[in-house]
Every structure is written in C-alpha cells, then in structure tokens.
Image (cartoon, helix red, strand yellow):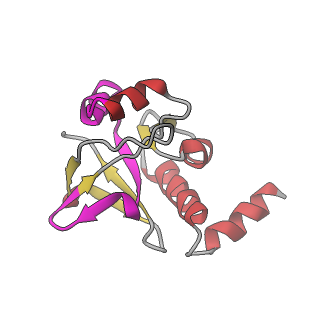
Amino acid sequence: MVGQAWSKLAANEDAALGGLYQAAEWIRENTEPSAVIAATDAGIIGWYSGRQTINLDGLVNTAAFQSLVCDGIGEYLQEKKVNYLVLFRDMFRHDNQIEVRFRGRLLGCISAPLVIGSDQEVYRDSGGRVHVVSLRGR
C-alpha cells in the first residue's frame, strides 16, 4: 500500500515530495552504500536511499542549526564528511556556479552562501525541483 502511494507520488513531476523520492532512488542506485548525504527535509531521502543522511533544517539537528547561525555550513559539511547535498531549486542561484543559502526553520536565520561549481550537480529530478550535488573534492 505504501509503495503504491510513493509510486504515484514519484510520477507527479510537480510534487516536491515526488522529486525527493526520485532523488532518493537515484542516490540509492548511483552512490556507494557508505555515502553521506545532507538535506533539508531529509526523511524521504534517508529512508528511501538507505544512506546515512544528515538533516540540515535545524529542527532535529542542533549542530547543523548552530552552523547555520554561525555561517559555518561549509565547515560543518566537511566535518561530517558529507559526499552529496540535496537541494530544492528555490534554495540556490544557478549560473556558472550554485550559490546555496540555508534557512533554519526554528529562528528563520539564513546562512552565508555556500558556493559549489555547477559541474558538481550530478542529478536533477524530472520536475527540475530537486537537485543533488557532489561535494567530493571540496
């Protein structure tokens, strides 16, 4: 029953949750089992990818929240050895580079920009809402 519901959701290109499900499937099929993933709204990614997943929205992960407050998100991702970052399209500006700003949900703080080369994007869902970038080599 649950699998059927997610299959229907994944087929809906306009659903952000469907995009997360598609990204989780891509991560499960295209990354090594030891990969570390970071995402806001990390539940779908963690459950369906089967990978260690770090939640970045600050609701359940106070260390990530403190990094957002202190503008140290890049250092936090390096410290946690994050290999891939899952992003929603509205989180970044995409020209020759991806400039990401995270918004903490508890206090609404906004991080300093995390700049990633656009060549590090490794996946985009069929609706163009959810992106996965590789942080390897940073």
- The quarter of the picture where residue 121 lies is bottom left
124 vs 109: above or below: below
Toward the left, the furthest residue is 96
Q: Which residue in the rendered view is the most extreme toward the right?
A: 1
| Residue 68 quadrant | top left
Q: Residue 82, how many percent across, how many down?
A: 35, 35
How many marks on residues?
Answer: 0
Q: Is residue 120 above or below residue 76?
A: below
Q: Which residues are magenta?
A: 70-98
Percent from the top left, x then y, of residue 32? Answer: 43, 41
The residue positioned 78% from the left and 64% from the top of the image is: 4
Name the residue: 44% across, 38% down. 56
Front one among 38 and 36: 38
Left or right: residue 78 compared with residue 43:
left
Figure check: 49 above or below 1 = above
Name the spot of residue 92 as percent of width and height, x first.
31, 59
Q: Position of residue 125 (x, y in %)?
A: 46, 67
Lateral position of residue 71 relative to residue 126, left or right: left
